[in-house]
Image (tube, grey):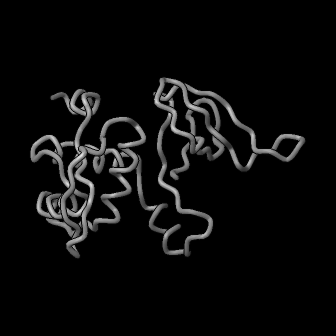
Amino acid sequence: MSAFTIPGWSDQQWIMDPVVQPGPLVRIICPALRQPDGKPTWAWIKRDRLHSTPAARTTDPITSHEAAAMQTPDKVTNSHRLVMALLFEHGPMTDFDLADRASRASQVKVKQTSIGVRRAELVRLGLVVDSGFKGKSDTGARAIRWALTDSGRKEIGA
């Protein structure tokens, strides 16, 4: 789950409540700020106020924290746009297909696990959805083919 800050409101790291929240308001949680009863502080905020900052899990090794610190919101945004553009151009694809196409497009090796994280974020935002069709993984196992939603097409101006 990516942590983020809310410019002009809080410099604390927040996370989105893991319960699916499809509307314009989302419940966010600040694990660092505790209420008197010990529970984390939470708030409702408009979805468009969120600015994602990649973060590693507290259980991840130091190398994951270093990699997360090197990311910028622009990099994440560019990665999201690449995933959406590939789905628009080529239709429903598995994360393995997306990684292959992204590697060709960027001329840099993109791993299925990395592209899967970006695609999962797009699913949470309602921009990408399970197409209902299956493809194959790199080992031949069945894998979900992901597709843009109408909102995803609007987001990229299609």
Q: Name the residue at 22% across, 62% down.
A: 99
- Residue 96: x and y in percent read 22, 64
Corner quadrant of residue 157:
top left
Q: In the image, is residue 120 above or below residue 114? A: above
| Residue 15 position within the rendered picture, expressed as x and y whole percent measured from the top left | 59, 45
Q: Quadrant of residue 142?
A: bottom left
Q: Residue at x 30, y 41 (%)?
A: 128
State whether residue 37 is above or below residue 8.
below
Left/right of residue 117 with respect to residue 27 in the rendered view: left
**Residue 103: x percent and y percent?**
17, 64
Q: Is 43 situated above or below 61?
A: above
Front residue of 122 and 48: 122
Q: Which residue is more in the foreground, 9 or 87?
A: 87
Q: Is residue 63 left or right of residue 58?
A: left
Position of residue 109 in the picture relative to residue 32 (left or right): left
Q: Is residue 38 above or below residue 116?
A: above
Image location (x, y in percent) of residue 100 = 16, 64
The one of 140 and 19 positioned closer to us in this rendering: 140
Instruction: Look at the image and tell me in which quarter the C terminus lies.
Output: top left
Q: Residue at x 56, y 71 (%)?
A: 60
Query: Relative to residue 135, is residue 75 drawn left or right?
Result: right
Q: What is the tally of numbered marks visible in this picture? A: 0
Location of residue 61 by image quarter = bottom right
Q: Residue furthest right?
A: 36
Tell me what residue is drawn at x 51 percent, y 33 percent.
21
